[in-house]
Amino acid sequence: MSAQVIAVMASGKGSNLHVILAAAGAGHCPVDVRLVISDRADAKALDIARTAGVAQVMYINPKDYADRAAFDTACADAIEAAGCRWIVLAGYMRILSSAFVQRFSGRIINIHPALLPAFAGADGVADALAYGVKLAGCTVHLVDEVLDGGPILAQAAVPVHDDDTRDSLHMRIQAEEHRLYPATLKRMVEEGFTLAGRRVIWNRI
């Protein structure tokens, strides 16, 4: 199983998937996106993946399965069959089951639009703005069984302006996401890391 081979799971418009594929295609991010899975038939991410020539592009309908665990098992089986080392979540809006997380322990990556551990949950941007912080940002982290609670791989901060709305702040955070996610995946593949408790220690090359 090559460290470069990844699966991407996405539910929406696929902007992070797009930048990962673009960075890989330009030689800036040494990953091989072998599989893209979506839980929504109308997800733009599926079109992005097909246009980019991803080897396997799959819509897996949750309604075809008895429960979340059965759906996650189907996704996990597809990921393993494709030989993917890492699972990269890019706007994937379903909470993963414990069985899925345990099956790929330490191999699932997510990006969240807040500086974790602050403002975990569904709308970190709005929560940060409502709280009145002066710095917001995004976090790339490993996924564990605590929502947005896994060890932190990388973070980037953006200033909060006095006239910010949720949309304007989110736009600036997303610009940092699009820079940080491919850069972190590159580092993950090229350097690797070890865990010391919750701390991610990057291996120097």
Image: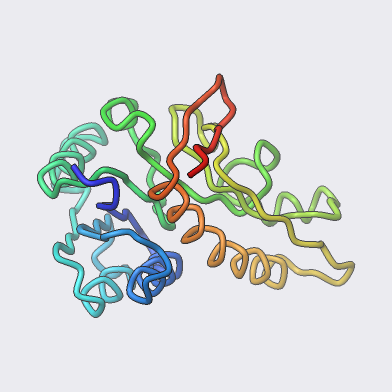
Q: Is residue 61 left or right of residue 88?
A: left
From the viewer's perspective, is residue 6 above or below residue 15?
above
Total residue callouts: 0
Q: Is residue 33 left or right of residue 132?
A: left
Identity of the residue drawn at 15% across and 41% down: 80
Q: Position of residue 30 (x, y in %)?
A: 35, 61
From the viewer's perspective, is residue 55 above or below residue 80?
below
From the viewer's perspective, is residue 51 above or below residue 38?
below
Identity of the residue drawn at 86% across and 52% down: 132
Residue furthest toward the bottom?
51
Q: Is residue 155 left or right of residue 129?
A: left
Q: Position of residue 86 (x, y in %)?
A: 31, 44
Residue furthest toward the left?
81
Question: Residue 8 or 131: which is nearer the viewer?
Answer: 8
Residue furthest toward the front?
205
Quarter of the view holding residue 42: bottom left
Quarter of the view holding residue 109: top left
What's the colour scheme? rainbow
Residue furthest toward the top?
197
Identity of the residue drawn at 43% across and 53% down: 185
Question: Residue 86 or 61: which is nearer the viewer?
Answer: 86
Quadrant of the drawing holding the N terminus: top left
Q: Position of residue 31 (x, y in %)?
A: 32, 59
Identity of the residue drawn at 41% across and 50% down: 190
Q: Is residue 138 left or right of residue 188?
A: right
Question: Residue 58 or 70: which is nearer the viewer?
Answer: 58
